[in-house]
């Protein structure tokens, strides 16, 4: 098969997967794709700066070989002389700051009991990537996980968040042409929650990963266009970041992957060629990219709006605002502006009631005379204004409302506020240059016609990165699934089984009815096994073993809510670490037994 036909096959698979994301379609296409993979493994165009690829990168292959040697030594030190070592993938789910802390506890305990040396991959979603990025950002982050845990507790206890530092990072980010709400989320909300800014990049972990001294990391996101491009959930939406490359992951025998070097992700491409290189985004940005779905749209909107207000007027509006507000005028304006924005973003049109309330509040106040005039004009033309005109009305109103205070700030700060407001009203997240832009002539609007792609929190699809470790190209034989989700502790398992059926990927059978019966008070360990499928060992965070009762489990969920935007006490952090550690400690023998069972011992 020619290089071109191989590329065309890939584009056809992507396009058909969008139009017909069903298991029957995957089965119909299976034989064609296998033939394509066998005839043209690897890259489809050596002159291109991107890769259409069945399998993993050469650097990841080297990392797996070296990691295998490391695991073999670990097994030998425990008395097992293995000819072949199983590929063990640790999955750490999303769950905001709760997940970040619990992930640290799990990794610390895996290290303490000697199991971390047997782990090949660590794949994270959302809040767990906050912990992963902290460890991979330091050259010695994995050498002493107890030290990393103590450092986490210190940061959270001392509240090392600085409003001015956050403001500087946001002003800098707003200078980029791909600035989006992800930047705002990264350098304000995630920084506030984790008390940490990381200016190193994922590619910096490439050398250590390739040496095999640490588990190979996979950071999960999803493509907004593919995820929401049709009525059904899209199978091909997963977009991975590794130290070596980033892109749409290989789905095994059903769809090849499309990748670009991690250092070039975000740079400008056209027709498969790099035309303008841009600096790789740092770990702080990657945290926001992976972990921006802490709540629904309205909760995210409230959080962003409150933070913008804080940046403009200071952390304490009553004390730091340049005007007195004895009657709560600014508070009322803030609330009505939020109602106006929320109505437009969620419902697609302005709220007439909010405009009337704003006009009433602003009437007679010289500070807001221009804003009041504009509000009156908006009310007069609201019913005939298009969504585009209404959006511009709101942007003009925000500018006139904030202008007296922005005049006292720097031009870069004013630009940051205006850009953020623009992103809110377009609800723009994860904007990055599409490396597949104008690649080939398939006409697939979701992949090649868009100059930008929009990456989002993978928790919006499946709150655990099963799709990135299950395809045969990564040969995963054991999955240790540490689930920090809020709500149903088995949702990721059930969703993954459905996903795998649609993608023709082997996965153990799951009894939904039985799991639903145990959801409110789960055990701390479940094992799922099936023919030609990896062994899945699942560990719900809060369970009847480490919590003792359904009442305590419920209390834990309330204490460590995903929508948690206040500081945890040191006691709360310690409890969460202990709960997550207990799940490893109490099941370490079961984990080790299954690893030994799959290892091929030399007789």
Image (spheres, rainbow, N blue to C red):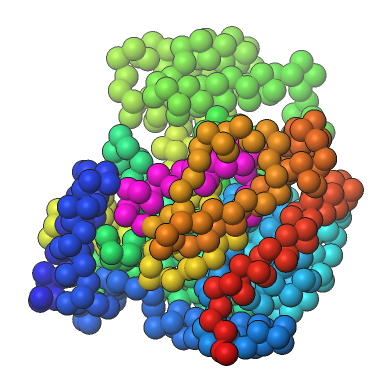
Q: Position of residue 163 (x, y in %)?
A: 73, 50
Query: Relative to 425, is 35 above or below?
Result: below
Query: Relative to 387, is 238 above or below?
Result: below
Quarter assignment of residue 245: bottom left
Looking at the image, which residue is at 43% across and 19% down?
A: 350
Q: Position of residue 115 (x, y in %)?
A: 69, 72
Q: Nearer the viewer, residue 126 or 464?
A: 464
Q: Is residue 509 left or right of residue 549?
A: left
Query: Relative to 118, is 389 above or below?
Result: above
Q: Which residues are magenta?
A: 481-505
Which quadrant of the figure contains the N terminus?
Answer: bottom left
324 inside magenta stretch:
no
Quarter assignment of residue 274: bottom left
Q: Is residue 435 left or right of residue 507?
A: left
- Residue 309 seen: no
Query: Relative to 12, is 230 above or below?
Result: above
Q: Position of residue 70 (x, y in %)?
A: 61, 86
482 inside magenta stretch:
yes
Looking at the image, which residue is at 34% across and 25% down?
A: 387
Looking at the image, which residue is at 57% across and 90% down?
A: 603
Quarter assignment of residue 401: top right
Q: Position of residue 19 (x, y in %)?
A: 21, 43
Q: Is residue 289 left or right of residue 11?
A: right
């Amino acid at each position: 098969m020619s290089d071109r036909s191989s590329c065309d096959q890939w584009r056809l698979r992507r396009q058909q997967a969008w139009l017909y994301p069903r298991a029957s379609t995957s089965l119909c296409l299976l034989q064609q794709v296998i033939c394509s993979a066998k005839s043209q493994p690897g890259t489809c165009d050596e002159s291109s700066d991107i890769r259409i690829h069945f399998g993993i990168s050469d650097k990841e292959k080297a990392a797996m070989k070296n990691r295998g040697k490391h695991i073999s030594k670990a097994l030998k030190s425990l008395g097992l002389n293995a000819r072949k070592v199983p590929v063990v993938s640790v999955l750490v789910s999303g769950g905001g700051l709760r997940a970040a802390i619990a992930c640290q506890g799990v990794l610390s305990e895996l290290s303490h009991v000697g199991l971390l040396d047997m782990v090949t991959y660590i794949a994270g979603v959302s809040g767990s990537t906050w912990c992963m990025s902290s460890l991979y950002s330091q050259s010695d982050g994995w050498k002493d996980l107890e030290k990393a845990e103590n450092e986490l507790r210190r940061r959270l206890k001392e509240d090392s968040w600085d409003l001015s530092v956050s403001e500087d990072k946001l002003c800098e980010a707003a200078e980029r042409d791909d600035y989006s709400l992800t930047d705002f989320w990264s350098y304000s909300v995630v920084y506030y929650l984790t008390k940490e800014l990381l200016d190193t990049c994922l590619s910096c972990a490439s050398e250590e990963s390739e040496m095999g001294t640490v588990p190979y990391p996979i950071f999960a996101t999803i493509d907004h266009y593919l995820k929401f491009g049709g009525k059904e959930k899209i199978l091909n939406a997963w977009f991975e970041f590794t130290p070596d490359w980033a892109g749409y992951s290989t789905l095994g025998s059903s769809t090849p992957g499309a990748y670009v070097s991690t250092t070039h992700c975000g740079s400008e491409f056209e027709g498969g060629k790099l035309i303008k290189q841009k600096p790789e985004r740092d770990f702080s940005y990657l945290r926001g990219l992976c972990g921006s779905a802490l709540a629904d749209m309205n909760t995210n909107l409230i959080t962003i709006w409150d933070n913008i207000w804080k940046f403009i007027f200071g952390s304490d509006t009553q004390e730091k605002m340049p005007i007195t507000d004895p009657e709560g005028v600014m508070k009322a304006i803030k609330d009505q502006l939020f109602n106006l924005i929320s109505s437009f973003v969620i419902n697609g049109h302005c709220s007439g009631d909010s405009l009337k309330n704003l006009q009433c509040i602003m009437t007679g106040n010289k500070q807001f005379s221009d804003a009041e005039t504009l509000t009156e004009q908006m009310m007069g033309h609201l019913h005939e204004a298009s969504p585009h005109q209404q959006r511009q009305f709101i942007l003009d109103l925000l500018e006139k409302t904030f202008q007296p205070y922005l005049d006292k700030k720097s031009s870069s700060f004013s630009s940051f506020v205006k850009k953020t407001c623009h992103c809110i009203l377009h609800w723009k997240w994860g904007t990055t240059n599409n490396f597949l832009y104008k690649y080939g002539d398939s006409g697939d609007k979701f992949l090649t016609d868009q100059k930008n792609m929009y990456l989002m929190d993978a928790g919006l699809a499946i709150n655990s990165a099963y799709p990135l470790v299950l395809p045969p190209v990564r040969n995963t034989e054991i999955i240790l699934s540490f689930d920090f989700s809020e709500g149903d502790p088995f949702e990721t398992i059930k969703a993954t089984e459905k996903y795998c059926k649609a993608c023709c990927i082997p996965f153990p059978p799951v009894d939904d009815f039985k799991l639903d019966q145990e959801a409110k008070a789960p055990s701390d360990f479940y094992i799922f096994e099936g023919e030609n499928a990896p062994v899945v060992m699942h560990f719900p965070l809060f369970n009847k073993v480490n919590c003792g009762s359904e009442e305590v489990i419920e209390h834990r969920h309330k204490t460590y809510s995903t929508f948690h935007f206040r500081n945890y006490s040191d006691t709360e952090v310690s409890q969460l670490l202990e709960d997550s550690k207990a799940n490893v400690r109490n099941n370490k023998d079961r984990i080790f037994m299954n690893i030994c069972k799959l290892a091929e011992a030399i007789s």
